[in-house]
C-alpha cells in the first residue's frame, strides 16, 4: 500500500525533467500528468495473492507445474472528470485486444486485476480484516510478504539435492516480512522492516 501527495509526486517528476516527455505521451492519449494526479486520491493498493502451482496444459507439451497468482491494483477516485479521461484512454489503448485484464469501479474506488472474480469482490467490499494490518496501519508506505506462501510455488522438479535442502531449511526458518514507513523526519525518510521466523521463541 502506498499513500502520497500529488503535489509531491509532480515536483519529483519535474526535478527529473520527465514532465515534458510524459505530457507529450499522455496528451496523445487524451489526458495530462495533472489529470492522472487529480484523478486518484493517491492512496494505492497492490496485492499478489492466491499463489499456487498449476499444471501446464499446452497442447504437445508435457504437463509441468507453473506458478500462478491473482494480481490486484486499486486506488480511490478523486476527480471524476479527470478519471473519466484515464478510463477513455485505457479503453482506446486496449480496444480490440484480449488482454486478460479486468476492471470495475464505483464513484469512489477503481480496481483492476487479472481475475474478474477478485476485482468484483474487492469493489463490492466485505471482510477486509487481516491480522497483519495492525502492524502496518497509519503509514504512507506499507508492504506485507508471506514467505511461506512463496515457498509453496517454487518448482522443485529441476532442483538438485542441495537446492532442495536449502529450500527445506528456508521453509523451517523464514515466516513473514513487514515493511512500513514513508514518514519524513530529520531530513530523511523513515522506514522499518521486520522479518519474523517460524521459531517464535527467537523472534
Image (tube, helix red, strand yellow):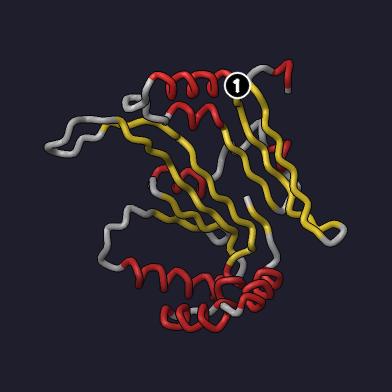
Residue depicted at x 13% and y 38%: 59
Residue 158 located left or right of residue 69: left
Residue nearest the observer in this picture, 194 or 105: 194
Residue 80 located left or right of residue 25: right
Residue nearest the observer in this picture, 160 or 171: 160
Residue depicted at x 41% and y 73%: 89
Q: Is residue 37 above or below residue 182?
A: below
Residue 163 x, y percent position in the rendering: 43, 24
Q: Is residue 113 above or below residue 145?
A: below
Q: Quadrant of the C terminus?
A: top right
- Residue 10 sits in quarter: bottom right
Residue depicted at x 71% and y 35%: 194
Q: Is residue 68 above or below residue 76?
A: above
Q: Residue furthest right?
A: 186
Q: Quick one: label 1, few (<14), some, or many (20+) residues within 10 Å? A: some
- Residue 164 sits in quarter: top left
Residue nearest the observer in this picture, 43 or 10: 10
Residue 169 x, y percent position in the rendering: 53, 19
Residue 155 x, y percent position in the rendering: 37, 29
The residue at which mark 1 appears reads as: 173
- Residue 137 sits in quarter: top right
Residue nearest the observer in this picture, 88 or 185: 185
Q: Residue furthest left?
A: 60
Q: Secondary structure at mark 1?
A: helix
The image shows a total of numbered marks equal to 1
Residue depicted at x 48% and y 23%: 167
Amino acid at each position: 500500500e502506498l499513500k502520497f501527495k500529488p503535489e509531491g509526486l509532480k515536483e519529483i517528476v519535474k526535478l527529473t525533467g520527465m514532465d515534458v516527455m510524459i505530457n507529450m505521451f499522455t496528451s496523445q492519449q487524451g489526458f495530462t500528468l495533472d489529470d492522472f494526479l487529480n484523478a486518484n486520491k493517491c492512496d494505492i493498493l497492490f496485492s499478489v495473492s492466491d499463489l499456487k502451482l498449476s499444471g501446464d496444459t499446452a497442447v504437445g507439451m508435457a504437463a509441468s507445474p507453473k506458478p500462478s497468482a491473482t494480481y490486484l491494483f486499486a486506488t480511490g477516485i478523486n476527480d471524476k472528470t479527470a478519471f473519466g479521461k484515464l478510463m477513455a484512454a485505457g479503453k482506446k489503448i486496449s480496444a480490440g485486444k484480449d488482454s486478460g485484464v479486468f476492471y470495475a469501479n464505483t464513484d469512489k474506488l477503481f480496481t483492476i486485476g487479472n481475475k474478474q472474480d477478485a476485482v468484483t469482490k474487492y469493489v463490492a467490499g466485505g471482510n477486509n480484516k487481516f491480522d497483519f494490518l495492525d502492524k502496518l496501519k497509519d503509514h504512507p508506505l506499507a508492504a506485507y510478504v508471506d514467505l511461506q506462501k512463496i515457498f509453496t510455488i517454487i518448482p522443485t522438479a529441476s532442483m538438485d539435492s542441495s537446492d532442495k535442502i536449502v529450500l527445506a531449511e528456508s521453509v523451517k526458518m523464514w515466516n513473514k516480512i513487514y515493511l512500513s514507513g514513508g514518514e519524513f523526519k530529520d531530513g530523511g525518510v523513515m522506514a522499518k522492516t521486520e522479518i519474523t521466523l517460524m521459531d517464535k521463541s527467537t523472534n
